Amino acid sequence: MTTSQQQPAKKGIKIPRLVISLVVLVVLGGVGWYLSRDDALNAKVGDCLHRKGGNDLAIVKCDSADANFTVLGRVESKTESEASADGVCDQWADATNTYWEGKSGQKGTLLCLKDK
């Protein structure tokens, strides 16, 4: 009797855990993007925003009755206190409002807005 018996080959396709993990990450990333695609932080110049409540804005179509603001300009890398300083949106003469998004104490993005 020999002690070295070969295991029978398993039939079927083996999918490595790494591939499964990557697929799961891609799917979760896609879901995250889909859910945040209308966040104000993603707004570009010319986009329109709707005030959902408080300080929560969302991108909407400009011909929508829900549109409250038009984005006139984006200013990157400003702290909240820099964003609230007078004159930051002066280069857009029609700007009536500002919206800053970021983490407190860190730099974020300022949107210069015009009432619709």
Image (tube, grey):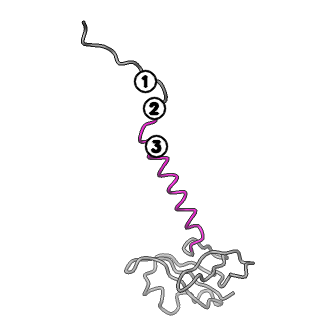
Say which of 11 and 75 sits in front.
11
Judging depth in this view, the residue of 11 and 106 nearest the camera is 11
Question: Is residue 73 inside the magenta stretch?
Answer: no
Judge left or right: residue 100 versus residue 69.
left
* Comparing labels 1 and 3, the label whose residue is closer to the camera: 1
- Do the residues under discs 1 and 2 have CB atoms within 8 angstroms? yes
Q: Position of residue 61 (x, y in %)?
A: 70, 74
Vertical relation: 26 (above or below) 18: below
Query: On the image, which quarter does residue 8 sit in?
Result: top left
Residue at 63% in and 79% down: 49
Q: Residue at x 51, y 57 (%)?
A: 29
The kind of residue on which mark 1 rests is Lys
Which residue, given by chain and number where applicable, does mark 2 sit on? 14
Give the residue furthest to the bottom: 86
Range of residues picked out in magenta: 15-39
Q: Disc 1 designates what residue?
A: 10
Given the image, on which type of amino acid does mark 2 rest? Lys
Give the farthest residue toward the right.
63
